[in-house]
Image (cartoon, rainbow, N blue to C red):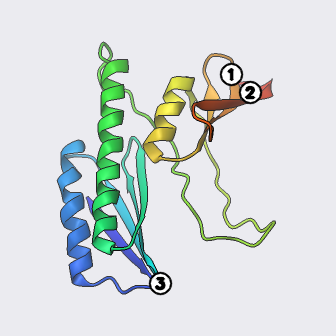
């Protein structure tokens, strides 16, 4: 795994760097040896604590976790635990879904990353997505894997551009475009 550790409002010391790399290296068991895996960790310091964001980019999927805590090292531990939970959950879901097909079916999507707060009506980032046809269940799995509140995809059942989102009251919501995409 290739590591990029960035400090915002904090200098990334050798101790911080070593703690992050040591924790993340335990996750190598989730990846194939020939996979190119990049990891970006952003460590932020605030007056009342710290925030750690870790994004792991693999050829098949992207995992992301973000944790705020009073103690930086606790935030690192919690963030890694969160990522491991996401990976275990995805692995279990894939084993259930593709037990007769094997795990060769790749899940590909773009990681939607958090950006710094912007002023009203200011576009701070534009992202182009290639929407691969997937089912609603696969979209929910991918949304959960990146720990976001929504996911945009092309629905295989009705060929509509769709957005699945996590509802505050629990459960999921689905938005679909009325016009179909012609492939």
Q: Is residue 32 visible?
A: no
Relative to 24, does residue 162 appear above or below in the rendering?
A: above
| Residue 13 image position (x, y, % from top left) | 27, 84
| Residue 80 image position (x, y, % from top left) | 30, 56
Drawn side of residue 88 relative to residue 48, left or right = left
Q: Residue furthest top?
A: 100
| Mark 1 residue element | loop
Q: Are marks 3 and 1 in contact (CB under 8 Å)?
A: no
Residue in the picture at 38% in, 45% down: 59
**Sequence-earlier tag: 3 or 2:** 3
Relative to 176, does residue 79 appear above or below in the rendering?
A: below
| Residue 180 image position (x, y, % from top left) | 77, 24
Image quadrant assignment for residue 5: bottom left
Relative to 136, does residue 28 appear above or below in the rendering?
A: below
| Mark 2 residue element | loop
3 or 2: mark nearer the eye: 3
Q: Is residue 29 visible?
A: yes
Residue in the picture at 23% in, 67% down: 21
Drawn side of residue 98 relative to residue 116, left or right = left
| Residue 62 image position (x, y, % from top left) | 42, 48
| Mark 3 residue element | loop
- Which one is nearer the viewer's eye here, 54 or 75? 75
Mark 1 to mark 2: distance in Å?
A: 6 Å
- Residue 181: image tag: 2
Drawn side of residue 70 relative to residue 14, left or right = right
> Which of the image's four quarters has the C terminus?
top right
- Residue 159: image tag: 1
Q: Are marks 1 and 2 in contact (CB under 8 Å)?
A: yes
3 or 1: mark nearer the eye: 3
**Total number of numbered discs in the rendering:** 3
């Amino acid at each position: 795994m290739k590591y990029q550790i960035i400090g915002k409002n904090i200098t990334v010391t050798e101790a911080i760097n070593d703690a992050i790399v040591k924790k993340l290296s335990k996750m190598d068991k989730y990846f194939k040896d020939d996979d190119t895996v990049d990891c970006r960790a952003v460590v932020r310091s605030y007056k009342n604590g710290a925030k750690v964001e870790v994004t792991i980019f693999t050829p098949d999927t992207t995992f992301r976790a973000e944790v705020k805590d009073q103690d930086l090292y606790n935030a690192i531990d919690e963030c890694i635990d969160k990522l491991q939970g996401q990976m275990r959950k995805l692995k279990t879901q894939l084993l259930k879904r593709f037990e007769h097909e094997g795990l060769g079916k790749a899940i590909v999507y773009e990681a939607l990353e958090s950006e710094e707060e912007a002023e009203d009506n200011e576009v701070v980032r534009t992202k182009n997505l290639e929407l691969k046809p997937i089912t609603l269940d696969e979209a929910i799995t991918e949304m959960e894997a990146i720990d976001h509140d929504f996911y945009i995809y092309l629905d295989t059942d009705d060929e509509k551009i769709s957005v699945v989102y996590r509802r505050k009251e629990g459960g999921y919501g689905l938005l679909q475009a009325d016009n179909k995409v012609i492939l």
